[in-house]
Amino acid sequence: MERYYQPEIETASREQIKAWQDERLVKQVRHVWDNVPYYRKKMQDAGLTPGDIQSSDDLRKLPFLSKADLRDAYPYGLVGVPLKDCVRIQSTSGTTGKRVVAFYTQEDIDLWETCCARAIVAAGGTNEDVCQVSYGYGLFTGGPGLNGGSHKVGCLTVPTSSGNTERQIMFIRDLNATILCCTPSYAAYLGESMREMGLTPEQIPLKAGIFGAEAWSEEMRQSIQDTLGIKAYDIYGLTELSGPGVAFECSAQSGMHINEDHFIAEVIDPDTGEVLPDGQQGELVFTAITKKAFPLIRYRTRDICVLSREKCPCGRTHVKMTKPRGRTDDMLIIRGVNVFPSQIETVLLNLGYPANYQILVGRVNNTDTLEVRVEMTPEMFTDNLGEINARQKQLVDGLRSMLGLTAKVTLVAPKSITRSEGKAVRVIDNRKI
Ligand code: DLL
């Protein structure tokens, strides 16, 4: 039996959801016009006033916000309430330029944690569960968001944060943790470590995992589920919109329900900005309709996905997004070919390799080079050169048929690629372009 945290909202009729969105959008646009001069100017430049927005059908008239706007307005330029009403900031782990700093009122935190609670209940969580939160705590939103959601559900919350793998495993075993929240790459690493300790899935008390913050493939899901003996659920979100819980997976495990009572989702053509119909792949754009401190309108996420309104067997009525299939900005273009790291991962996992790899892109004599370093499992590890060559050739062929590109493949010893306790760093692009 499917359980919901807020059944009346999560299974509301489409008419009801539209009515909430209409009313909340109109109010939010007025709030932003009155309180965020940066966005008011954008509206004025587009010849708009709040009166032009009468319902969610008018959303597409409004100008976009992008990461560049966040940088321009850093740190306070997009804040929609007096600072005395803000109680928290969170920030992204971005590596270039200024970090994104997002602001929250107490109500904003409450609605964010409610979204995370919905995700935990969708993964089967109740107040009988022990929920270990192994996402990083601090500026990163993963730890604080799921911690808050876990409290709301009434789980016994174990705030281990990331790192210290031995201690993670000790708590999972000693406290009989039933739900694990962390990045999929860390879940795979924890699984690998437990297997090495000789633990079988039956000896691991976990029953569900809530994994997100980075891309992971279906093959990786399968492998984590098998090693840990759990059902693994995807969760999506971004700091600019609160953090994890913007969308979450249900028992159907076929896309994530977007919390549409708080966020309106659109998919656009990233080149023209044109709104695409459901079912077409494009860049995901979100409008936050209830958050007050950081009320972003038509924020371009750079995440590429597809929306679907097909009826979901779980009974939830909120629109579903596919797993992000890459980002408009980390899509690699190698010798003119668009390459998503997730495609490379699919080839590796299909051929039985673990999801421990590095993609190195370079440029020699004005030609792009692509090298994929792939870790062998201990069972594959050998010093028989013939066998290694045959394995490398199989990977080169697999990558060529997936990408249409010839890559150099280097097999490396088990555990030789540095593990990440948070988001994995898989791509190293040395082309200074
Ligand atoms: O990663 C929030 C989060 C924490 C989500 C814990 C889920 C779990 P940021 O650091 O701001 O926030 O990074 C946001 O990460 O635009 C996506 O590109 C990527 N991302 C987040 N969740 C997923 C996912 C958090 N489930 C950026 N699948 C987003 C693929 C994801 N990519």
Image: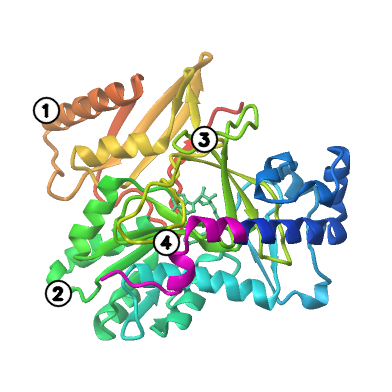
Q: Magenta stretch?
A: 1-19
Which residue lies under the disc numbered 2? 203
Query: Observer-nearest residue: 105 or 16?
Result: 16
Separation of marks 3 and 4 at Cα, in angstroms: 38 Å
Of mark 4 and mark 2, the one earlier in the sequence is 2
The local secondary structure at tag 2 comes to helix
Dot label at residue 421:
4
Give the position of the C terminus as an image quadrant: top right
Left or right: 247 with respect to 104?
Answer: left
Secondary structure of the residue carrying tag 1 is: helix
Which tag is nearer the camera, tag 4 or tag 2?
Answer: 2
Residue at the spot of label 3: 277
Determine the image quadrant of residue 276: top right
**Residue 46 vs residue 58, the one in the foreground:** 58
Q: CA distance from mark 1 to mark 4?
A: 35 Å
Helix, strand, or loop for circle 3? loop
Q: Amino acid at mark 1?
A: Gly
Q: Rate crowding at label 4 as few (under 14), some (14 to 19) or many (20 or more) other CA atoms within 10 Å.
A: many
Residue 36 % position (x, y) = 84, 57
- Camera-near label (2 vs 1) is 2
Whichever of callouts 1 and 3 sits on the residue coming sooner in the sequence is 3
Q: Nearer the viewer, mark 2 or mark 3?
A: 3
Mark 3 surroundings within 10 Å by alpha-carbon count, few (fewer than 14), some (14 through 19), many (20 or more)? some
Q: Is residue 136 visible?
A: no
Q: Which disc number belongs to residue 59?
A: none
Horizontally, residue 210 falls left or right of residue 239, namely: left
Is label 4 in a helix, a strand or a loop? loop
Rounded to the nearest angstrom, the CA distance separating label 4 from label 2 is 23 Å
Residue at mark 1: 386
What residue appears at the point 32 percent right and 61 percent down from the top-left corner? 314
